[in-house]
Amino acid sequence: MADPINAIAEWLQNLLTGWGMAPGLALVIRFALGVIVIATVMLVLDIFLVWLERKVVARFQVRLGPNRLGRYGLLQPFADVLKLLIKEDTTPLGADKFLYNLAPIIALATVLLLWGVIPYAPTIVGADINVGVLYIVAVGAIGTLGIIIAGWSSNNKYALLGAFRAVALMISYEVPMVLALLIPVMLADTMGINAIVASQNVWFIFVAPVAALIFLISAIAELGRAPFDMTEAESELVAGYVTEYSGMKFGLFYAGELLHALTMGALFATLFLGGWRGPFVEQIPILGAVYLLVKALFMYWVIMWVRYTLPRVRIDHMLSLNWKFFTPLALVVLIVTALLDRILEGAGASTLVYTLVMLGANLLVGWITLTLLRSYARRERVKVAEPRPVAVPPEPTGPAGGPVSAAPSVTPSTPNN
Amino acid sequence: MTPVQLVFILVAATTLGAALMVVITRNLIHAALWLVLSLFGIAVMYVLLSAPFLAVAQVVIYIGAIAILMIFAIMLTRRSTSEEGPALNANWGWGALLGVVTLGGLVWVLSSWPGFFAAPAPFPEGTDPLLTLGQALVSPNGYVLPFELASVLLLAALIGAIVVAWDRR
Protein backbone atom coordinates (compact mmCIF):
# COMPACT_ATOMS: atom_id res chain seq x y z
CA MET A 1 0.00 0.00 0.00
CA ALA A 2 3.00 2.24 0.61
CA ASP A 3 3.95 2.25 -3.04
CA PRO A 4 0.78 1.81 -5.11
CA ILE A 5 2.18 2.90 -8.48
CA ASN A 6 4.93 0.29 -8.58
CA ALA A 7 2.54 -2.33 -7.20
CA ILE A 8 0.11 -1.63 -10.06
CA ALA A 9 2.94 -1.68 -12.60
CA GLU A 10 4.20 -5.02 -11.33
CA TRP A 11 0.70 -6.49 -11.28
CA LEU A 12 0.17 -5.34 -14.87
CA GLN A 13 3.49 -6.80 -15.97
CA ASN A 14 2.64 -10.13 -14.37
CA LEU A 15 -0.85 -10.08 -15.86
CA LEU A 16 0.38 -9.40 -19.40
CA THR A 17 3.19 -11.95 -19.27
CA GLY A 18 0.71 -14.37 -17.68
CA TRP A 19 -1.40 -14.04 -20.84
CA GLY A 20 1.59 -15.27 -22.81
CA MET A 21 2.87 -11.89 -23.98
CA ALA A 22 6.60 -11.38 -24.50
CA PRO A 23 8.11 -9.51 -21.51
CA GLY A 24 9.60 -6.89 -23.85
CA LEU A 25 6.22 -6.07 -25.40
CA ALA A 26 4.60 -6.01 -21.97
CA LEU A 27 7.24 -3.48 -20.89
CA VAL A 28 6.45 -1.29 -23.91
CA ILE A 29 2.74 -1.41 -23.09
CA ARG A 30 3.46 -0.58 -19.45
CA PHE A 31 5.58 2.43 -20.42
CA ALA A 32 2.97 3.62 -22.91
CA LEU A 33 0.32 3.41 -20.19
CA GLY A 34 2.63 5.31 -17.84
CA VAL A 35 2.98 8.10 -20.39
CA ILE A 36 -0.79 8.28 -20.84
CA VAL A 37 -1.37 8.36 -17.08
CA ILE A 38 1.19 11.12 -16.44
CA ALA A 39 -0.07 13.23 -19.34
CA THR A 40 -3.69 12.83 -18.23
CA VAL A 41 -2.98 13.62 -14.60
CA MET A 42 -1.01 16.71 -15.62
CA LEU A 43 -3.73 17.95 -17.95
CA VAL A 44 -6.43 17.46 -15.31
CA LEU A 45 -4.19 19.26 -12.83
CA ASP A 46 -3.88 21.97 -15.48
CA ILE A 47 -7.66 22.59 -15.38
CA PHE A 48 -7.33 23.05 -11.63
CA LEU A 49 -4.41 25.44 -12.22
CA VAL A 50 -6.67 27.76 -14.23
CA TRP A 51 -8.86 28.13 -11.15
CA LEU A 52 -5.82 28.50 -8.89
CA GLU A 53 -4.19 31.17 -11.03
CA ARG A 54 -7.39 33.20 -11.29
CA LYS A 55 -8.08 32.90 -7.57
CA VAL A 56 -4.55 33.90 -6.56
CA VAL A 57 -4.36 36.85 -8.94
CA ALA A 58 -7.70 37.99 -7.57
CA ARG A 59 -6.31 37.91 -4.04
CA PHE A 60 -3.22 39.85 -5.12
CA GLN A 61 -5.49 42.49 -6.63
CA VAL A 62 -7.91 42.54 -3.66
CA ARG A 63 -10.74 40.88 -5.59
CA LEU A 64 -12.64 37.66 -5.00
CA GLY A 65 -12.00 35.86 -8.25
CA PRO A 66 -14.35 33.18 -9.63
CA ASN A 67 -16.89 32.39 -6.91
CA ARG A 68 -20.24 31.67 -8.57
CA LEU A 69 -19.96 28.29 -10.23
CA GLY A 70 -19.60 25.51 -7.71
CA ARG A 71 -18.12 25.89 -4.25
CA TYR A 72 -15.41 28.59 -4.29
CA GLY A 73 -15.91 28.77 -8.05
CA LEU A 74 -14.23 25.42 -8.49
CA LEU A 75 -16.37 24.54 -11.53
CA GLN A 76 -15.44 27.75 -13.35
CA PRO A 77 -12.48 26.23 -15.30
CA PHE A 78 -14.72 23.46 -16.65
CA ALA A 79 -17.08 26.12 -17.98
CA ASP A 80 -14.04 27.87 -19.50
CA VAL A 81 -12.94 24.65 -21.19
CA LEU A 82 -16.44 24.11 -22.60
CA LYS A 83 -16.49 27.67 -23.89
CA LEU A 84 -13.11 27.24 -25.56
CA LEU A 85 -14.21 23.97 -27.12
CA ILE A 86 -17.37 25.36 -28.74
CA LYS A 87 -15.80 28.64 -29.87
CA GLU A 88 -15.29 29.16 -33.58
CA ASP A 89 -11.93 27.89 -34.71
CA THR A 90 -10.49 30.50 -37.05
CA THR A 91 -7.49 30.31 -39.32
CA PRO A 92 -6.20 33.62 -40.65
CA LEU A 93 -5.97 34.19 -44.39
CA GLY A 94 -2.53 33.34 -45.73
CA ALA A 95 -1.60 31.29 -42.69
CA ASP A 96 0.50 28.19 -43.11
CA LYS A 97 -2.26 25.76 -42.09
CA PHE A 98 -0.20 22.75 -41.08
CA LEU A 99 2.34 24.69 -39.03
CA TYR A 100 -0.39 26.91 -37.60
CA ASN A 101 -2.09 23.84 -36.18
CA LEU A 102 1.17 22.20 -35.14
CA ALA A 103 2.43 25.09 -32.98
CA PRO A 104 -0.08 24.79 -30.06
CA ILE A 105 0.57 21.05 -29.90
CA ILE A 106 4.33 21.62 -29.64
CA ALA A 107 3.78 24.31 -27.01
CA LEU A 108 1.82 21.96 -24.74
CA ALA A 109 3.73 18.78 -25.54
CA THR A 110 7.14 20.24 -24.66
CA VAL A 111 5.81 21.09 -21.21
CA LEU A 112 4.42 17.58 -20.72
CA LEU A 113 7.76 16.13 -21.86
CA LEU A 114 9.46 17.71 -18.87
CA TRP A 115 7.31 15.66 -16.49
CA GLY A 116 8.84 12.51 -17.92
CA VAL A 117 12.09 13.02 -16.01
CA ILE A 118 10.90 14.60 -12.77
CA PRO A 119 11.10 12.05 -9.93
CA TYR A 120 7.79 11.98 -8.05
CA ALA A 121 8.97 9.75 -5.24
CA PRO A 122 12.12 7.71 -4.57
CA THR A 123 10.64 4.76 -6.42
CA ILE A 124 8.32 6.54 -8.86
CA VAL A 125 10.40 7.98 -11.68
CA GLY A 126 9.21 8.31 -15.25
CA ALA A 127 12.57 7.91 -16.97
CA ASP A 128 15.66 8.02 -14.79
CA ILE A 129 18.05 8.99 -17.58
CA ASN A 130 21.61 9.93 -16.69
CA VAL A 131 21.44 13.16 -18.71
CA GLY A 132 18.27 14.48 -17.07
CA VAL A 133 19.43 18.06 -16.58
CA LEU A 134 20.56 18.38 -20.19
CA TYR A 135 17.25 16.85 -21.28
CA ILE A 136 15.44 19.76 -19.60
CA VAL A 137 17.51 22.22 -21.63
CA ALA A 138 16.87 20.29 -24.85
CA VAL A 139 13.11 20.24 -24.31
CA GLY A 140 13.21 23.99 -23.66
CA ALA A 141 14.89 24.41 -27.04
CA ILE A 142 12.05 22.57 -28.78
CA GLY A 143 9.58 24.83 -26.95
CA THR A 144 11.32 27.85 -28.47
CA LEU A 145 10.82 26.29 -31.88
CA GLY A 146 7.07 25.99 -31.22
CA ILE A 147 6.86 29.71 -30.50
CA ILE A 148 8.73 30.63 -33.70
CA ILE A 149 6.40 28.40 -35.69
CA ALA A 150 3.34 29.98 -34.06
CA GLY A 151 4.56 33.51 -34.78
CA TRP A 152 5.57 32.84 -38.35
CA SER A 153 2.66 30.69 -39.48
CA SER A 154 0.01 33.16 -38.24
CA ASN A 155 0.80 35.58 -41.09
CA ASN A 156 0.48 38.50 -38.69
CA LYS A 157 3.07 41.18 -37.99
CA TYR A 158 2.32 41.36 -34.28
CA ALA A 159 2.58 37.60 -33.96
CA LEU A 160 5.93 37.61 -35.75
CA LEU A 161 7.26 40.45 -33.60
CA GLY A 162 6.14 38.60 -30.49
CA ALA A 163 7.89 35.47 -31.70
CA PHE A 164 11.11 37.41 -32.37
CA ARG A 165 11.03 38.80 -28.87
CA ALA A 166 10.24 35.42 -27.37
CA VAL A 167 13.17 33.83 -29.14
CA ALA A 168 15.57 36.60 -28.14
CA LEU A 169 14.37 36.20 -24.56
CA MET A 170 14.51 32.43 -24.44
CA ILE A 171 17.87 32.05 -26.16
CA SER A 172 19.45 34.72 -23.96
CA TYR A 173 18.10 33.44 -20.67
CA GLU A 174 19.07 29.90 -21.54
CA VAL A 175 22.71 30.90 -20.89
CA PRO A 176 22.46 31.83 -17.18
CA MET A 177 19.91 29.05 -16.72
CA VAL A 178 22.29 26.38 -18.00
CA LEU A 179 25.11 27.83 -15.90
CA ALA A 180 22.87 27.79 -12.83
CA LEU A 181 21.79 24.22 -13.61
CA LEU A 182 25.45 23.18 -13.68
CA ILE A 183 25.82 23.98 -9.99
CA PRO A 184 23.42 21.31 -8.65
CA VAL A 185 25.02 18.93 -11.14
CA MET A 186 28.45 19.71 -9.70
CA LEU A 187 27.27 19.45 -6.10
CA ALA A 188 25.58 16.09 -6.73
CA ASP A 189 28.30 14.80 -9.11
CA THR A 190 25.62 13.56 -11.52
CA MET A 191 23.20 14.77 -14.18
CA GLY A 192 20.50 12.25 -13.30
CA ILE A 193 17.66 14.11 -11.63
CA ASN A 194 16.68 11.37 -9.20
CA ALA A 195 20.30 11.10 -8.08
CA ILE A 196 20.42 14.88 -7.59
CA VAL A 197 17.38 14.65 -5.32
CA ALA A 198 18.85 11.67 -3.48
CA SER A 199 22.09 13.57 -2.77
CA GLN A 200 20.30 16.56 -1.23
CA ASN A 201 20.81 15.71 2.42
CA VAL A 202 21.04 19.45 2.73
CA TRP A 203 18.73 21.24 0.31
CA PHE A 204 20.81 22.84 -2.42
CA ILE A 205 19.11 26.19 -1.87
CA PHE A 206 21.20 26.44 1.32
CA VAL A 207 24.38 25.39 -0.47
CA ALA A 208 23.87 27.47 -3.61
CA PRO A 209 21.34 30.25 -2.97
CA VAL A 210 22.70 32.53 -5.73
CA ALA A 211 22.38 29.77 -8.31
CA ALA A 212 18.83 29.09 -7.10
CA LEU A 213 17.93 32.75 -7.53
CA ILE A 214 19.45 32.89 -11.01
CA PHE A 215 17.59 29.72 -11.97
CA LEU A 216 14.31 31.11 -10.66
CA ILE A 217 14.66 34.39 -12.56
CA SER A 218 15.72 32.73 -15.81
CA ALA A 219 12.87 30.25 -15.38
CA ILE A 220 10.43 33.16 -15.15
CA ALA A 221 12.03 34.63 -18.28
CA GLU A 222 11.79 31.27 -20.03
CA LEU A 223 8.10 31.20 -19.14
CA GLY A 224 7.62 34.62 -20.70
CA ARG A 225 5.73 35.77 -17.62
CA ALA A 226 5.75 39.27 -16.19
CA PRO A 227 8.09 41.05 -15.63
CA PHE A 228 9.48 39.35 -18.75
CA ASP A 229 6.23 39.22 -20.73
CA MET A 230 7.19 41.56 -23.56
CA THR A 231 6.58 38.58 -25.86
CA GLU A 232 2.87 39.14 -25.48
CA ALA A 233 2.92 42.70 -24.21
CA GLU A 234 -0.74 43.50 -24.71
CA SER A 235 -0.18 47.25 -24.82
CA GLU A 236 2.23 46.92 -27.75
CA LEU A 237 1.68 43.64 -29.57
CA VAL A 238 -2.02 42.75 -29.05
CA ALA A 239 -1.10 39.29 -27.70
CA GLY A 240 2.22 38.47 -29.34
CA TYR A 241 2.50 35.08 -30.97
CA VAL A 242 -0.96 33.94 -29.81
CA THR A 243 -2.72 36.90 -31.48
CA GLU A 244 -4.43 34.88 -34.21
CA TYR A 245 -5.28 31.78 -32.22
CA SER A 246 -8.83 31.22 -31.02
CA GLY A 247 -10.84 28.54 -29.32
CA MET A 248 -9.08 25.43 -28.14
CA LYS A 249 -5.86 26.25 -30.01
CA PHE A 250 -5.50 29.30 -27.80
CA GLY A 251 -6.57 27.02 -24.96
CA LEU A 252 -3.61 24.76 -25.62
CA PHE A 253 -1.19 27.71 -25.45
CA TYR A 254 -2.86 28.90 -22.26
CA ALA A 255 -2.80 25.45 -20.68
CA GLY A 256 0.82 25.05 -21.76
CA GLU A 257 1.77 28.35 -20.15
CA LEU A 258 0.10 27.56 -16.84
CA LEU A 259 1.45 24.04 -16.70
CA HIS A 260 4.91 25.34 -17.68
CA ALA A 261 4.85 27.62 -14.64
CA LEU A 262 4.01 24.68 -12.37
CA THR A 263 6.65 22.59 -14.13
CA MET A 264 9.31 25.22 -13.53
CA GLY A 265 8.19 25.30 -9.90
CA ALA A 266 8.54 21.51 -9.74
CA LEU A 267 11.98 21.70 -11.36
CA PHE A 268 13.07 24.33 -8.86
CA ALA A 269 11.71 22.18 -6.05
CA THR A 270 13.48 19.13 -7.44
CA LEU A 271 16.85 20.78 -7.98
CA PHE A 272 17.03 23.11 -5.01
CA LEU A 273 14.33 22.22 -2.47
CA GLY A 274 15.00 18.52 -2.17
CA GLY A 275 12.22 17.27 -4.49
CA TRP A 276 10.41 14.35 -2.88
CA ARG A 277 12.49 14.50 0.30
CA GLY A 278 10.56 14.85 3.54
CA PRO A 279 9.77 13.00 6.74
CA PHE A 280 8.73 9.30 6.50
CA VAL A 281 9.34 9.17 2.77
CA GLU A 282 11.55 6.08 3.13
CA GLN A 283 8.71 4.11 4.72
CA ILE A 284 5.88 5.40 2.53
CA PRO A 285 7.31 6.37 -0.89
CA ILE A 286 4.00 7.77 -2.16
CA LEU A 287 4.35 10.62 0.36
CA GLY A 288 7.19 11.89 -1.82
CA ALA A 289 4.74 12.85 -4.56
CA VAL A 290 2.75 14.88 -2.02
CA TYR A 291 5.89 16.69 -0.82
CA LEU A 292 6.92 17.40 -4.40
CA LEU A 293 3.48 18.77 -5.26
CA VAL A 294 3.43 20.98 -2.17
CA LYS A 295 6.89 22.39 -2.94
CA ALA A 296 6.03 22.83 -6.62
CA LEU A 297 2.81 24.68 -5.78
CA PHE A 298 4.71 26.90 -3.36
CA MET A 299 7.21 27.83 -6.10
CA TYR A 300 4.29 28.32 -8.50
CA TRP A 301 2.86 30.75 -5.98
CA VAL A 302 6.20 32.58 -5.83
CA ILE A 303 6.23 32.83 -9.64
CA MET A 304 2.67 34.23 -9.56
CA TRP A 305 3.65 36.62 -6.78
CA VAL A 306 6.48 37.99 -8.93
CA ARG A 307 4.22 38.12 -11.99
CA TYR A 308 1.46 40.16 -10.38
CA THR A 309 3.78 42.47 -8.44
CA LEU A 310 6.38 43.70 -10.90
CA PRO A 311 5.79 45.82 -14.00
CA ARG A 312 7.03 44.79 -17.42
CA VAL A 313 10.72 45.34 -18.21
CA ARG A 314 11.73 46.99 -21.48
CA ILE A 315 13.33 44.58 -23.94
CA ASP A 316 16.78 46.25 -24.06
CA HIS A 317 16.88 46.49 -20.26
CA MET A 318 15.95 42.84 -20.07
CA LEU A 319 18.68 41.77 -22.47
CA SER A 320 21.37 43.86 -20.82
CA LEU A 321 20.25 42.54 -17.43
CA ASN A 322 20.83 39.07 -18.78
CA TRP A 323 24.13 39.55 -20.58
CA LYS A 324 25.78 42.13 -18.34
CA PHE A 325 24.54 40.91 -14.98
CA PHE A 326 23.21 37.35 -14.75
CA THR A 327 25.67 35.69 -17.10
CA PRO A 328 28.84 37.06 -15.41
CA LEU A 329 27.33 36.45 -11.98
CA ALA A 330 26.47 32.86 -12.87
CA LEU A 331 30.01 32.33 -14.21
CA VAL A 332 31.56 33.71 -11.02
CA VAL A 333 29.34 31.56 -8.82
CA LEU A 334 30.12 28.53 -10.96
CA ILE A 335 33.89 29.03 -10.59
CA VAL A 336 33.64 29.72 -6.85
CA THR A 337 31.44 26.66 -6.27
CA ALA A 338 33.69 24.39 -8.33
CA LEU A 339 36.85 25.49 -6.50
CA LEU A 340 35.31 25.33 -3.03
CA ASP A 341 33.73 21.95 -3.73
CA ARG A 342 37.12 20.46 -4.66
CA ILE A 343 38.95 22.15 -1.76
CA LEU A 344 36.39 21.14 0.87
CA GLU A 345 36.11 17.58 -0.38
CA GLY A 346 39.90 17.33 -0.44
CA ALA A 347 40.06 18.61 3.14
CA GLY A 348 37.41 16.09 4.18
CA ALA A 349 35.03 18.69 5.60
CA SER A 350 31.88 17.50 7.38
CA THR A 351 28.47 18.24 5.91
CA LEU A 352 27.88 21.10 8.32
CA VAL A 353 31.20 22.82 7.55
CA TYR A 354 30.70 22.22 3.84
CA THR A 355 27.23 23.80 3.90
CA LEU A 356 28.32 26.76 6.02
CA VAL A 357 31.37 27.53 3.84
CA MET A 358 29.31 27.25 0.65
CA LEU A 359 26.55 29.43 2.10
CA GLY A 360 29.13 31.97 3.27
CA ALA A 361 30.82 32.07 -0.13
CA ASN A 362 27.45 32.56 -1.83
CA LEU A 363 26.50 35.34 0.56
CA LEU A 364 29.90 36.98 -0.04
CA VAL A 365 29.41 36.84 -3.80
CA GLY A 366 25.93 38.27 -3.37
CA TRP A 367 27.17 41.05 -1.12
CA ILE A 368 30.00 41.98 -3.53
CA THR A 369 27.47 42.02 -6.37
CA LEU A 370 25.14 44.30 -4.46
CA THR A 371 28.03 46.63 -3.54
CA LEU A 372 29.14 46.85 -7.17
CA LEU A 373 25.57 47.51 -8.27
CA ARG A 374 25.18 50.21 -5.65
CA SER A 375 28.34 52.04 -6.72
CA TYR A 376 27.26 51.72 -10.36
CA ALA A 377 23.85 53.15 -9.52
CA ARG A 378 25.51 56.01 -7.63
CA ARG A 379 27.64 56.89 -10.67
CA GLU A 380 24.60 56.68 -12.93
CA ARG A 381 22.63 58.96 -10.62
CA VAL A 382 25.46 61.53 -10.67
CA LYS A 383 25.46 61.35 -14.46
CA VAL A 384 21.71 61.86 -14.63
CA ALA A 385 21.76 64.68 -12.07
CA GLU A 386 24.28 66.73 -14.09
CA PRO A 387 22.68 69.73 -15.82
CA ARG A 388 22.16 68.77 -19.40
CA PRO A 389 22.28 71.27 -22.27
CA VAL A 390 18.84 72.64 -22.92
CA ALA A 391 17.83 73.47 -26.47
CA VAL A 392 17.72 77.24 -26.88
CA PRO A 393 16.53 79.11 -29.96
CA PRO A 394 19.42 80.21 -32.15
CA GLU A 395 20.49 83.85 -31.87
CA PRO A 396 18.55 85.82 -34.45
CA THR A 397 20.96 87.33 -36.97
CA GLY A 398 20.72 90.90 -38.18
CA PRO A 399 20.78 92.00 -41.81
CA ALA A 400 24.55 92.43 -41.74
CA GLY A 401 24.99 88.88 -40.69
CA GLY A 402 26.31 89.79 -37.28
CA PRO A 403 24.35 89.25 -34.17
CA VAL A 404 21.69 91.78 -33.41
CA SER A 405 22.78 94.05 -30.62
CA ALA A 406 21.84 92.44 -27.43
CA ALA A 407 18.58 93.28 -25.80
CA PRO A 408 18.67 96.57 -23.93
CA SER A 409 20.17 96.18 -20.55
CA VAL A 410 16.98 97.15 -18.81
CA THR A 411 16.33 93.47 -18.27
CA PRO A 412 19.42 92.33 -16.50
CA SER A 413 20.59 88.81 -16.99
CA THR A 414 17.84 86.43 -16.08
CA PRO A 415 19.23 82.95 -16.18
CA ASN A 416 17.96 81.16 -19.20
CA ASN A 417 16.34 78.05 -17.86
CA MET B 1 11.47 -8.29 -36.01
CA THR B 2 12.22 -6.80 -32.60
CA PRO B 3 10.52 -3.56 -31.52
CA VAL B 4 13.90 -1.80 -31.68
CA GLN B 5 14.33 -2.73 -35.32
CA LEU B 6 10.81 -1.53 -36.09
CA VAL B 7 11.53 1.80 -34.40
CA PHE B 8 14.85 2.03 -36.25
CA ILE B 9 13.21 1.52 -39.65
CA LEU B 10 10.48 4.09 -38.92
CA VAL B 11 12.97 6.67 -37.64
CA ALA B 12 15.43 6.08 -40.47
CA ALA B 13 12.68 6.47 -43.06
CA THR B 14 11.47 9.68 -41.39
CA THR B 15 15.00 11.08 -41.22
CA LEU B 16 15.73 10.33 -44.87
CA GLY B 17 12.33 11.57 -46.03
CA ALA B 18 12.75 14.81 -44.09
CA ALA B 19 16.26 15.23 -45.50
CA LEU B 20 14.88 14.78 -49.01
CA MET B 21 12.18 17.35 -48.30
CA VAL B 22 14.85 19.84 -47.15
CA VAL B 23 16.33 19.66 -50.64
CA ILE B 24 13.18 19.69 -52.76
CA THR B 25 10.82 22.00 -50.88
CA ARG B 26 10.53 25.47 -52.36
CA ASN B 27 9.81 27.43 -49.20
CA LEU B 28 12.95 28.20 -47.19
CA ILE B 29 11.23 28.17 -43.80
CA HIS B 30 9.70 24.81 -44.59
CA ALA B 31 13.14 23.56 -45.59
CA ALA B 32 14.54 24.68 -42.24
CA LEU B 33 11.71 22.95 -40.36
CA TRP B 34 12.18 19.73 -42.34
CA LEU B 35 15.84 19.98 -41.38
CA VAL B 36 14.77 20.15 -37.74
CA LEU B 37 12.78 16.93 -38.19
CA SER B 38 15.74 15.26 -39.88
CA LEU B 39 18.11 16.31 -37.08
CA PHE B 40 15.63 15.09 -34.51
CA GLY B 41 15.56 11.72 -36.25
CA ILE B 42 19.33 11.55 -35.85
CA ALA B 43 18.91 12.31 -32.13
CA VAL B 44 16.52 9.33 -31.89
CA MET B 45 19.18 7.23 -33.64
CA TYR B 46 21.63 8.13 -30.88
CA VAL B 47 19.06 7.01 -28.30
CA LEU B 48 18.71 3.67 -30.12
CA LEU B 49 22.51 3.35 -29.99
CA SER B 50 22.37 3.90 -26.17
CA ALA B 51 24.17 7.22 -26.42
CA PRO B 52 21.73 9.49 -24.56
CA PHE B 53 24.29 12.24 -24.02
CA LEU B 54 24.91 12.59 -27.76
CA ALA B 55 21.15 12.51 -28.39
CA VAL B 56 20.44 15.33 -25.98
CA ALA B 57 23.45 17.32 -27.16
CA GLN B 58 22.21 16.88 -30.73
CA VAL B 59 18.84 18.38 -29.80
CA VAL B 60 20.35 21.23 -27.76
CA ILE B 61 22.95 22.23 -30.33
CA TYR B 62 21.41 21.43 -33.69
CA ILE B 63 17.74 22.16 -32.99
CA GLY B 64 18.08 24.63 -30.12
CA ALA B 65 20.87 26.70 -31.61
CA ILE B 66 21.67 26.05 -35.25
CA ALA B 67 18.19 25.47 -36.67
CA ILE B 68 16.72 28.40 -34.75
CA LEU B 69 19.59 30.60 -35.95
CA MET B 70 18.87 29.51 -39.54
CA ILE B 71 15.17 30.29 -39.21
CA PHE B 72 16.05 33.65 -37.71
CA ALA B 73 18.47 34.43 -40.53
CA ILE B 74 15.87 33.48 -43.14
CA MET B 75 13.19 35.62 -41.46
CA LEU B 76 15.51 38.62 -41.17
CA THR B 77 17.08 38.53 -44.63
CA ARG B 78 14.22 37.60 -46.93
CA ARG B 79 11.85 40.30 -47.98
CA SER B 80 8.94 37.96 -47.55
CA THR B 81 9.34 34.65 -45.77
CA SER B 82 6.76 33.05 -48.04
CA GLU B 83 8.83 33.97 -51.09
CA GLU B 84 9.43 30.86 -53.13
CA GLY B 85 12.48 30.45 -55.29
CA PRO B 86 13.47 27.56 -57.53
CA ALA B 87 14.19 24.47 -55.46
CA LEU B 88 17.03 23.25 -57.64
CA ASN B 89 19.77 25.04 -59.51
CA ALA B 90 21.77 23.91 -62.52
CA ASN B 91 24.26 21.89 -60.50
CA TRP B 92 21.77 19.52 -58.88
CA GLY B 93 22.98 16.59 -60.96
CA TRP B 94 26.56 16.99 -59.77
CA GLY B 95 25.36 17.34 -56.18
CA ALA B 96 23.32 14.15 -56.43
CA LEU B 97 26.27 12.32 -57.99
CA LEU B 98 28.58 13.50 -55.21
CA GLY B 99 26.08 12.35 -52.58
CA VAL B 100 25.75 8.88 -54.13
CA VAL B 101 29.53 8.54 -54.50
CA THR B 102 30.10 9.56 -50.85
CA LEU B 103 27.48 7.09 -49.64
CA GLY B 104 28.96 4.33 -51.80
CA GLY B 105 32.46 5.10 -50.54
CA LEU B 106 31.37 5.04 -46.92
CA VAL B 107 29.53 1.75 -47.32
CA TRP B 108 32.53 0.25 -49.17
CA VAL B 109 34.98 1.34 -46.48
CA LEU B 110 32.75 0.24 -43.62
CA SER B 111 31.90 -3.13 -45.13
CA SER B 112 35.56 -4.12 -44.83
CA TRP B 113 35.28 -3.48 -41.06
CA PRO B 114 34.39 -6.68 -39.17
CA GLY B 115 31.97 -4.91 -36.81
CA PHE B 116 29.77 -3.79 -39.70
CA PHE B 117 27.45 -6.81 -39.67
CA ALA B 118 27.89 -7.76 -36.01
CA ALA B 119 25.29 -6.97 -33.38
CA PRO B 120 26.53 -4.32 -30.91
CA ALA B 121 28.08 -5.72 -27.76
CA PRO B 122 26.13 -4.75 -24.63
CA PHE B 123 27.76 -2.40 -22.16
CA PRO B 124 29.67 -4.17 -19.40
CA GLU B 125 27.63 -4.16 -16.19
CA GLY B 126 28.24 -1.23 -13.88
CA THR B 127 29.78 1.17 -16.38
CA ASP B 128 28.25 4.55 -16.97
CA PRO B 129 28.86 5.53 -20.62
CA LEU B 130 28.46 9.19 -19.71
CA LEU B 131 31.09 8.93 -16.97
CA THR B 132 33.45 7.13 -19.33
CA LEU B 133 32.93 9.79 -21.99
CA GLY B 134 33.57 12.60 -19.53
CA GLN B 135 36.74 11.01 -18.20
CA ALA B 136 38.00 10.23 -21.69
CA LEU B 137 37.57 13.89 -22.69
CA VAL B 138 39.89 15.15 -19.95
CA SER B 139 42.29 12.26 -19.43
CA PRO B 140 45.82 12.57 -20.88
CA ASN B 141 45.47 9.08 -22.34
CA GLY B 142 42.19 10.08 -23.96
CA TYR B 143 41.15 13.15 -25.87
CA VAL B 144 42.41 16.00 -23.71
CA LEU B 145 44.44 17.60 -26.51
CA PRO B 146 41.62 17.77 -29.09
CA PHE B 147 39.27 18.88 -26.33
CA GLU B 148 41.54 21.75 -25.27
CA LEU B 149 42.23 22.69 -28.90
CA ALA B 150 38.49 22.91 -29.55
CA SER B 151 38.14 25.07 -26.44
CA VAL B 152 40.85 27.43 -27.66
CA LEU B 153 39.20 27.56 -31.07
CA LEU B 154 35.84 28.44 -29.49
CA LEU B 155 37.49 31.09 -27.32
CA ALA B 156 39.15 32.58 -30.40
CA ALA B 157 35.77 32.63 -32.17
CA LEU B 158 34.23 34.33 -29.13
CA ILE B 159 36.94 37.01 -29.05
CA GLY B 160 36.65 37.39 -32.81
CA ALA B 161 32.91 38.01 -32.50
CA ILE B 162 33.54 40.67 -29.87
CA VAL B 163 36.20 42.36 -32.04
CA VAL B 164 33.90 42.35 -35.08
CA ALA B 165 30.99 43.76 -33.10
CA TRP B 166 33.12 46.29 -31.18
CA ASP B 167 31.86 49.83 -31.51
CA ARG B 168 34.98 51.88 -32.30
CA ARG B 169 34.49 55.48 -31.32
Image (tube, rainbow, N blue to C red):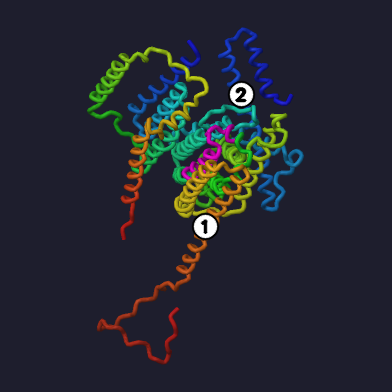
Q: Label 2 is found on which chain of the structure? A: A
Residue at the image position 55 percent from the left and 49 percent from the top: A210
Residue at the image position 28 percent from the left and 23 percent from the top: B99
Image mark for residue A368: 1
Q: Disc 2 on helix, strand or loop?
A: helix
- Are the numbered discs 2 and 1 placed on the same chain, yes or no? yes
Q: Is residue A270 left or right of residue A94?
A: right
**Residue A314's x, y, as percent?**
49, 54
Res A259 quadrant in image: top right
Residue A59 in sight from this viewpoint: yes
Q: Main secondary structure of the magenta part?
A: helix
Q: Examine the structure image and report whether residue A317 is included in the region drawn in magenta.
A: no
**Residue A188's x, y, as percent?**
55, 37
Q: Label 1 is found on which chain of the structure? A: A
Image mark for residue A34: 2
Q: Disc 1 on helix, strand or loop?
A: helix
Residue nearest the viewer, comparing A148 with A264? A264
**Residue A4's x, y, as percent?**
70, 24
Residue A243 in sight from this viewpoint: no
Residue lying at the far front of the rendered structure: A347
Q: Residues within 10 Å of mark 2 (few under 14, many from 20)?
A: some
Residue lying at the far bottom of the rendered structure: A410
Q: Is residue B163 left or right of residue A349?
A: left
Foreground tag (2 vs 1): 1
Q: Give the Cα distance between marks 2 and 1.
A: 48 Å
- Going by the numbered disc 2, the residue's amino acid type is Gly
Tally the marks: 2
Point out the stretch of residues depicted in magenta: A174-196
Residue lying at the far right of the rendered structure: A71
